[in-house]
Image (tube, rainbow, N blue to C red):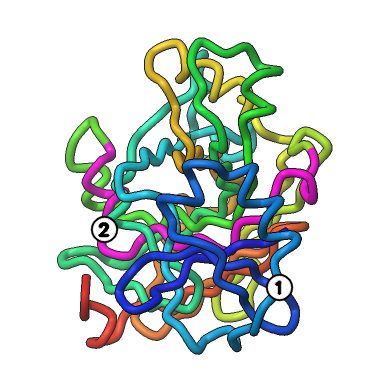
């Protein structure tokens, strides 16, 4: 089953996504209070479908959600940057204010040559997780989506911490959530591709992950409790722009597509004066 977020009369809702349209289910807060229960209710729900696009799509994580991103988590990506694979995951945070959805233009930050693409699989927590082993951690994942961890490299490299460069306005677009039962295990392998203006720039597979999503969840849960709606963004494969000669960045008018097997395609236009509106 697939879900998206909708703005309905100023309130954030979750809707079931189908081939023929979308069916609003409940508010974002109510959904994440009982994700498994609302999944069952959504499966049985009937009613008038809305054409997709009739309502504005929005991210549907709760405002208080934590977004944990993982750096250098594909062996080939670590190698292309000249890094030794880390002993523990490199974890940094995104604020929910930086999140966006497919089709929304991303403004270029001031002083940047452009933005860099990073195709990633995002995992959404469905139940509270505290001090969990990997089996329990795997069971806590409600679903997955495409994600593009668009990065302002100049800002990222200003300090030892990556927070600034990883939180540019609208720089965390995500696709529809696909429930875990339709995706299976990432260790079995999902193909991860990125295209810029139709040219393929990334083509990796989740079998190359250094740290699995269950192992990351387990590690985080030893320090803090993960709550429903929290997100783990699992890292990007090789092929990013900054390591190329010369570096290749996304500029005004470019369109970047992230396509992940079983999850779909996320489309993000870059730049333009209107992209900063509402940022």
Of 193 and 94, the residue lying toward us = 94
- Select label 1 or label 2 by which is in front: 1
In the image, what residue occupies the spot 70% across and 66% down?
45
User: Looking at the image, is 124 positioned above or below residue 240?
Assistant: above
In the image, what residue occupies the spot 50% across and 26% down?
128
| Image quadrant occupied by the N terminus | bottom right
Circle 2: is it few (<14), some (14-19), or many (20+) Cα within 10 Å?
A: many
Task: Please give the range of residues in magenta.
Answer: 162-184
Of 135 and 10, the residue lying toward us = 10
Quick one: SS at disc 2? loop
Location of mark 1 (residue): 46
In the image, what residue occupies the spot 26% across and 63% down?
169
The circle on residue 56 is: none
Residue 243 located left or right of residue 262: left
In the image, what residue occupies the spot 27% across and 49% down?
165
Location of mark 2 (residue): 168
């Amino acid at each position: 089953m697939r879900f998206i977020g909708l703005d309905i009369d100023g309130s954030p809702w979750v809707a079931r996504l189908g081939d023929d349209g979308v069916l609003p289910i409940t508010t974002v807060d109510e959904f994440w209070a009982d994700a498994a229960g609302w999944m069952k209710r959504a499966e049985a729900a009937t009613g008038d479908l809305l054409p997709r696009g009739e309502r504005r799509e929005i991210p549907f994580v709760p405002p208080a959600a934590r977004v944990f991103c993982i750096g250098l988590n594909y062996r080939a990506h670590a190698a292309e940057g000249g890094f030794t694979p880390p002993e523990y995951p490199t974890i940094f945070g995104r604020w929910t204010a930086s999140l966006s959805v497919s089709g929304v233009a991303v403004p270029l930050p001031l002083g940047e040559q452009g933005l860099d693409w990073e195709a990633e699989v995002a995992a959404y927590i469905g139940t509270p997780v505290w001090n969990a082993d990997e089996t329990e951690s795997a069971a806590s994942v409600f679903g997955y989506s495409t994600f593009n961890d668009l990065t302002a490299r100049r800002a990222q490299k200003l300090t030892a911490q990556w927070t600034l460069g990883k939180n540019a306005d609208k720089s965390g677009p995500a696709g529809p959530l696909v429930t875990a039962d339709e995706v299976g295990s990432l260790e079995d392998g999902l193909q991860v591709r990125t295209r810029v203006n139709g040219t393929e720039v990334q083509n990796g597979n989740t079998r190359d992950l250094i740290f699995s999503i269950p192992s990351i969840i387990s590690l985080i849960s030893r320090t803090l409790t993960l709550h429903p709606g929290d997100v783990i963004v699992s890292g990007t494969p090789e092929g990013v722009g900054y390591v190329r000669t010369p570096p290749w960045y996304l500029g005004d008018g470019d369109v970047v597509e992230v396509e992940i097997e079983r999850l779909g395609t996320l489309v993000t236009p870059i730049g333009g004066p209107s992209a900063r509106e509402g940022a």
